[in-house]
Image: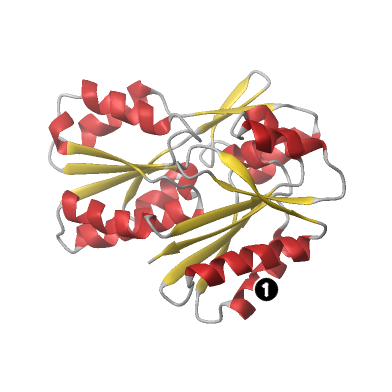
């Protein structure tokens, strides 16, 4: 049996992950002198309260030691497939590779850089569980996941650009647009999936959503894709975006999720992400 491991980029807490057959290693968020394992020790609502108090957050990946403990427990009897969030946006992939190299059962562990995050990452982890339950090998599961990964697209619409700039996950050119007024920037992942870059800038949110819809139409998004809309405490806005997307893509499955503390740290309060991945 292949055991599936992932991190909280999937927006699953450890408890929720266990219910779906996924072992979750939480990312951490640091506020002032306090550090919390996100979704296990602090909720998004609690995190946003701390932000309103003026705290400046940072985030961190799981430690190599924690990863090694996890691997040694799971790989004693089974093969392990660890699907991490995009390398470059987090150090999780690198930490996982280092833990695998030091683990006595390293030959039973496969670490896969999902090259994505949040909604598509969640989908990949759940797809891996389904394939594992069907008796597929690690290599077969990885091949199937890579097929989905090749047809994925992620967009982020930030409200407070200072969070993105502070996190250092922007291309130099993208970082320069943060001070521009009365524009709605639409960010997307770079070709190597390691940073964010400017996709377009529009005068209104409606125009920004139209630009995303155009891109998805060019991709041929239909019932064979899965779409997610994730948000940082702006559920009403996210549901409006879902309405627009569902009207444009009536046969596409679309879910709305609240972002976790680490991704609010990266995208800032009020941000909305729209993502698709091939099923």
Rendered image coloring scheme: secondary structure
Question: Dot 1, crowdedness within 10 Å: few (<14), some or many (≥20)?
Answer: some
Quarter location, residue 109? top left
Residue at 56 percent across and 77 percent down: it is 249
**Nearer the observer, 118 or 150:** 150
Q: How many marks?
A: 1
Residue 140 rendering spot, x and y as whole percentages:
18, 56
Residue at 23% from the left image edge and 39% from the top image edge = 110
**On screen, 246 above or below 40?**
below
Q: Nearer the viewer, residue 202 or 158?
A: 202
Residue at image location 49% in from the left, 72% down from the top: 221
Residue 160 appears at what percent x and percent y?
A: 76, 41
Where does residue 104 sit, x and y in percent of width and height? 15, 24
Q: Which residue is mark 1?
A: 244
- Can residue 12 be spotted in the picture? no
Q: Secondary structure at mark 1?
A: helix
Q: Residue at x 54, y 62 (%)?
A: 228
């Amino acid at each position: 049996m292949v055991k599936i491991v992932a991190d909280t980029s999937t927006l699953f807490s450890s408890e929720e992950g266990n219910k779906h057959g996924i072992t979750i290693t939480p990312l951490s968020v640091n506020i002032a002198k306090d550090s919390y394992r996100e979704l296990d020790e602090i909720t998004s609502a609690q995190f946003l309260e701390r932000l309103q108090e003026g705290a400046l957050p940072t985030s961190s990946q799981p430690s190599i030691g924690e990863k090694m403990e996890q691997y040694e427990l799971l790989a004693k009897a089974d093969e392990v497939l660890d699907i991490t969030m995009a390398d470059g946006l987090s150090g999780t992939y690198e930490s996982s590779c280092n833990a695998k190299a030091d683990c006595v059962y390293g030959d039973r562990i496969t670490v896969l850089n999902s090259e994505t995050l949040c909604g598509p990452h969640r989908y990949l982890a759940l797809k891996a569980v389904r394939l594992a339950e069907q008796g597929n090998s690690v290599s077969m599961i990885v091949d199937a996941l890579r097929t989905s990964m090749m047809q994925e697209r992620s967009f982020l619409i930030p409200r407070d650009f200072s969070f993105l700039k502070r996190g250092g996950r922007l291309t130099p050119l993208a970082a320069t647009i943060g001070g521009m007024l009365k524009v709605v920037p639409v960010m997307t992942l770079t070709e190597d999936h390691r940073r964010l870059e400017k996709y377009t800038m529009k005068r209104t949110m409606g125009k920004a959503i139209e630009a995303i819809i155009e891109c998805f139409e060019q991709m041929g998004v239909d019932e064979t894709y899965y779409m997610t809309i994730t948000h940082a405490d702006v559920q009403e806005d996210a549901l409006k975006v879902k309405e627009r997307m569902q009207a444009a893509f009536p046969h596409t499955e679309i879910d709305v999720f609240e972002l976790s503390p680490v991704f609010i740290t990266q995208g800032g309060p009020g941000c909305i992400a729209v993502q698709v991945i091939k099923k």
